[in-house]
């Protein structure tokens, strides 16, 4: 089953407080262009220079943001901005944060090098479909920098509740890095080199499968990179560094494991009419208008709360329209005739709100093919509910759909069934920061 091993982490020489926090970056897929530009200005050594650098006039095959990222990686190592730890280690990570309902939560896990497996082997399990564009971009970064700059996020079962004790023992010493990231999360990182403590952490996932919570694009990119290197250089060692990926591992039962939804905004719809869409929705959904004004924060909060009342009870989502600036909760009718909609046969996958939205509404009623959805020809994804509502009210998008979070048991059940949800179905929060610890890839060397 899953194999995890220690690795020689590469970390910023700055290891505490604001000095380190200024160098970290959110995951590449959460960074807007405005935020990226601000991070680029914040420090010449902010990790966004490597993960999501800017394009420049005159760029071409020989000089571009990917080659600049590789050059910066080498320079930072040579200058001591980045340092390689002296021995292989596992890296426990604790994240303390505030949930939207005002609770302070703590999520704990550890970082390791995870051996790559094809999804067909059933050892590393995906739960979401991926998009073409991000994979091409991540492959270019991986080829040039030859390092894992951002960890994937993996989940494992811990029915014996053994993780907490193993982490307590592993984190007995002072952390090697501690800071607040810009999302307000307090980050503490430890380095474990003791053989017994490493073995205790490895035992947590021994004989288990790892479910990918976040990082599907990076994982699939790593599989492709491994295949390309093996084809170009036959005879690379069985334990070569390109056969592993950097991952953060967390038990599914961790009390700080939180899942948020990702919302859908539509654009470029030919001859779109709100009245026509409502008429097409009527046979399938109970349509519950929200009287409160979306122009007020209280109205937006009330609309989201109304959607939340249906969580776990029925397939439902919140539709926001630019035409009348109203929100409507759409609840799937028990007697709806779904024979014409191409819903999947798997009952767990079929019951997901996000599946109903993509298959019934986007594909069946609006005519957006799965290929068009994957290419994001008419749909874009937004994490923040307030931003989603504001972008519709501004007229940037004619209509948007807000969703409830997908519960952990459904994520697990979909993975167990060998199925995948539509892309961007889940958001595990807080997201892992890039730059706390990284991993160089040497195909001829150890993991």
Image (tube, helix red, strand yellow):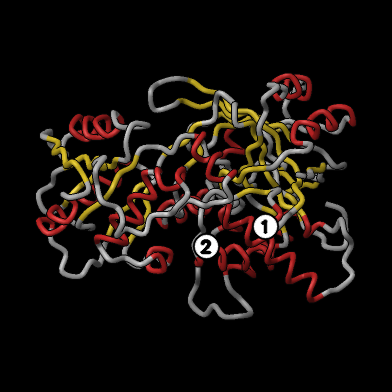
Q: Report if residue 178 is visible in the image.
A: no
Can residue 123 be seen in the rendering of this structure? yes
> Which quadrant: the N terminus?
top right
- For image coordinates 73% across by 54% down, the residue present is 116
**Along the line of sight, the residue nearer the viewer: 204 or 76:** 204
Calculate the distance from the C-alpha at mark 1 to the C-alpha at mark 2: 22 Å
Residue at mark 2: 134
Q: Position of residue 374 (x, y in %)?
A: 43, 64
At 61% across and 76% down in the image, what residue appears?
63
Does 224 appear above or below 175? below
Decide: few, some or many residues near mark 2? Use Cα within 10 Å; few <14, some 14-19, many ≥20: some
Q: Residue 148 in the image: x percent, y percent?
A: 69, 54
The crowding category of the residue bearing disc 1, from other C-alpha atoms within 10 Å (few below 14, some 14 to 19, many at least 20), is: few
- The spot of residue 311 in percent (x, y) is 34, 32
Q: Quadrant of residue 137?
A: bottom right
Q: Is residue 443 above or below residue 437?
A: below
User: Disc 1 or disc 2, which is closer to the eye?
Assistant: 1
Do tag 1 and tag 2 residues touch (Cβ < 8 Å)? no
> Callout 1: helix, strand or loop?
helix
Looking at the rendered structure, the secondary structure element under dot 2 is helix
Q: Is residue 407 left or right of residue 176?
A: left
* Residue 228, quarter of picture: bottom right
Q: Residue at x 22, y 54 (%)?
A: 399
Q: Residue 427: x and y, percent?
A: 47, 42
Q: Please count the marks in the image.
A: 2
Please determine whether, in this image, residue 297 is positioned above or below residue 385: above
Frontmost residue, 100 versus 34: 100
Closer to the chain start, of discs 1 and 2, is 1
**Residue designated by label 1:** 120
**Eyeballing the image, is 160 above or below 243?**
above
């Amino acid at each position: 089953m899953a194999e995890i091993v220690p690795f020689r982490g590469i970390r910023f020489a700055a290891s505490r407080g604001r000095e380190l926090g200024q160098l970290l970056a959110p995951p590449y897929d959460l960074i807007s262009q405005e935020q990226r530009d601000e991070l680029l200005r914040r420090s010449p050594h902010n990790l966004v220079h490597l993960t999501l650098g800017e394009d420049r006039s005159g760029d071409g095959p020989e000089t571009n943001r990917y080659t600049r990222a590789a050059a910066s990686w080498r320079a930072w190592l040579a200058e001591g901005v980045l340092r390689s730890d002296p021995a292989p280690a596992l890296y426990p990570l604790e994240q303390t944060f505030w949930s939207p309902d005002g609770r302070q939560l703590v999520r704990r896990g550890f970082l390791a090098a995870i051996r790559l497996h094809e999804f067909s082997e059933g050892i590393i399990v995906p739960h979401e479909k991926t998009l073409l564009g991000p994979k091409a971009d991540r492959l270019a970064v991986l080829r040039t920098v030859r390092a894992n700059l951002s960890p994937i996020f993996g989940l494992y079962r811990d029915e014996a509740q053994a993780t907490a004790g193993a982490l307590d023992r592993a984190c007995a010493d002072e952390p090697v890095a501690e800071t607040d990231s810009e999302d307000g999360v307090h980050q503490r990182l430890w380095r474990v080199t003791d053989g017994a403590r490493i073995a205790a952490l490895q035992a947590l996932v021994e004989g288990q499968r790892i479910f990918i919570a976040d990082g599907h694009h990076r994982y699939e990119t790593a599989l492709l990179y491994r295949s390309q290197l093996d084809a170009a250089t036959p005879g690379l060692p069985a334990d070569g560094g390109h056969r592993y990926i950097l991952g953060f591992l967390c038990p599914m039962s961790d009390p700080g494991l939180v899942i948020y939804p990702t919302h859908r905004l539509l654009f470029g719809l030919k001859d779109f009419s709100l009245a026509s869409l409502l008429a097409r929705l009527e046979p399938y959904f109970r349509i519950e208008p929200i009287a409160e004004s979306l122009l007020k924060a209280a109205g937006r909060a009330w609309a989201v709360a109304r959607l939340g009342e249906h969580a776990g009870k029925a397939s439902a989502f919140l539709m926001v329209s630019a035409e009348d600036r109203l929100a409507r909760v759409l609840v799937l009718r028990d007697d709806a005739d779904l024979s014409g909609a191409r819903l999947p046969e798997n009952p767990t996958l079929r019951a997901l709100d996000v599946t109903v939205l993509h298959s019934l509404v986007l594909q069946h009623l609006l005519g957006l093919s799965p290929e068009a959805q994957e290419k994001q020809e008419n749909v874009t994804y937004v994490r923040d509910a307030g931003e989603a509502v504001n972008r519709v009210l501004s007229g940037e998008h004619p209509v948007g759909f807000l969703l409830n979070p997908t519960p952990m048991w459904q994520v697990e059940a979909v993975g167990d069934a060998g199925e995948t949800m539509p892309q961007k179905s889940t958001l595990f929060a807080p997201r892992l920061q890039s730059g706390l610890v990284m991993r160089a890839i040497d195909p001829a060397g150890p993991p």
